[in-house]
Image: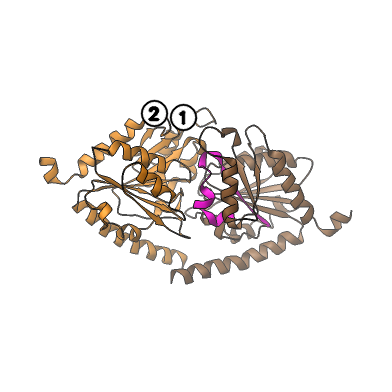
Chain colours: A brown, B orange
Amino acid sequence: MKITYENKVLSKNDRIAAEVRRHLTARGIFAVNLIGSPGSGKTSLVERTAAWCHGRVAAAALTGDQATCHDADRIERSGIPAIQITTGNECHLNAQRILDCVARDELWDIELLLIENVGNLICPAAYDLGEASKVAILSVPEGDDKPLKYPGLFKRADLMVISKIDLLGSNDFEADRAEANAREVAPHIEVVRLSCRTGEGLEGWTRWLASQLVQTAPLTARQA
Amino acid sequence: MKITYENKVLSKNDRIAAEVRRHLTARGIFAVNLIGSPGSGKTSLVERTAAWCHGRVAAAALTGDQATCHDADRIERSGIPAIQITTGNECHLNAQRILDCVARDELWDIELLLIENVGNLICPAAYDLGEASKVAILSVPEGDDKPLKYPGLFKRADLMVISKIDLLGSNDFEADRAEANAREVAPHIEVVRLSCRTGEGLEGWTRWLASQLVQTAPLTARQA
C-alpha cells in the first residue's frame, strides 16, 4: 500500500515536472537541480556561479529550505534574483513548487535557472523538478564513501561536484576514491573538484555549465 | 489527503515505538537516537563511545544506511556488537526496524543502545524509535545556521553535539552562534562540543551519557 501511494505521488509529480520542462525548454532555459547534504556548499556554489554569470548569462535561482530566507538573501547579494521556497515539514522540493515560480518576473528572460534543493542527500533525488540536469554535491568533510552509502542521487546525477577541496588533508577523504565510488554506482557520472572558498577548480564547473548552456540555447539564438 | 496518510503512518509508528520503549525500559536499557547529516561524524562518535564503554558499560549499536555495511563493520572493530540496518529507498529508520532487533542476542544484556540513524537532518526527526533521547549532531563544516534552517530535529533533541571542532577556523562557523541558534528554536537543548579526531571535549559527551545511564538503570541495580 505504501508503494502504491508513493508511486501515485511520484507519478503526479512526474506529470507536473513534464509541464515545467516544456516551459523551460520552450524558453531556452537550462535548469540545474543542485542536491547535497546540509552544509555541503550548495549556496556558496550558487553565489560563485552568480558572479561568473555577470555580463555573460542571465540567471536566477530558486532555493529551498525548511525554514528561513537566509539563502535567497545571500544569493541576491551576489547579483542574481533569487526566490526562496520554504518547504516547512517537507524534506525536498517537488515539481509543483517550481511550476508555481516559472511565470514569475524574476525568471522571465533568463537562460540559466539554478535550483538549490533542500539540504538532503536522499529524498530530493526521487523528485523530478523538470530540470535538465541533476548535480550531486559532495563536500570533503562528509567522507568519500557517501556515493556507496547513498547511491540513489549519484545514479540520477549527470555531474558530481566534489566541494570544499581546500579541506583535503583535514580528514581521510581521497578525491580519487570518491570518484571511483561514484563511478561504481554511476559509471556515466562526470566529476569536477572545486573550492568555493579559494576558487580552485571553479573553471571545471563553469566549463560544464557553459557546454550545457550552448546545447540548451534556442535555435534562433544559436543561429544569431 | 497527504496529511491523513502521513498521520496514519506516524500513528502506526508511534504504537510500535511505544512497544519498543516498553521492552527497553523493562530491561533498563538507555537508547539514544543519533541524528545528523551524512558525514557529520555519527559513526565516529559511536566508535569513540564504544571505546569509553569498554569495562564500564555493556553497549551495542544499530546503524542505518541506505546501502552498505561499512558502519557496522567500523563499529564492531571498536569493540561492541553492531547490527547494520539497510533501508534501501527509505531515508530514515522507523520503530519497526528497531523492534525487529530488540530480541536479538547482540542486544540482550546491554545497558546502552546507540542507534545511528540514516544520514539526514530532516526525515529521521519525525520518527519515534522508542529511544529515551534524540541527539542532534551538527558538524562544524555544515555551518552554524543549520538549527534555524532545519528546526524540526533540534526541537525534538535533548542534546546537540557540535562535532569536528578541530575544524573550527576553517570556515565562519562560530560555536557560540550555533548554540544561540539552537536555543532560539529549542530553548531546552543541552550542548556539548567535541572532536572525535582529537578527543577534545569527549568528556562532555560521556558525562551526559553517564548521567542518563544512572537514571535508566533498573531499581535493583541502583540499590545494589
The range drawn in magenta is A132-154
**What percent of the width, then of the height, locates residue A103?**
69, 58
Q: Nearer the viewer, residue A78 or B48?
A: B48
Residue at the (60%, 58%) spot, across then down: A156
Q: Earlier in the sequence, mark 1 or mark 2?
A: 1
**What percent of the width, then of the height, locates residue A106?**
70, 50
Give neighbour class at mark 2: few <14, some 14-19, many 20+ (Cα, 10 Å).
some
Q: In what element is the residue under mark 1?
A: helix
Q: Are marks 1 and 2 in contact (CB under 8 Å)?
A: yes
Q: Which residue is mark 2?
A: B200
- Real-space Cα separation, disc 1 to disc 2, in angstroms: 8 Å
Quarter location, residue A165:
top right
Q: Nearer the viewer, residue B212 or A201?
A: A201
Residue at the (19%, 52%) spot, across then down: B27
Tell me which amino acid carries mark 1.
Asp
Q: In what element is the residue under mark 2?
A: loop
Residue A153 sits inside the magenta stretch:
yes
Tell me which amino acid carries mark 2.
Glu
* Label drawn at residue B166: 1
Q: Is residue B72 above or below residue B207?
A: below
**What percent of the width, then of the height, locates residue A192?**
66, 44
Residue B19 seen by the camera: yes
Chain letter of disc 1 in the image: B
- In the displayed structure image, the side of residue A121 where residue A22 appears, left or right: right
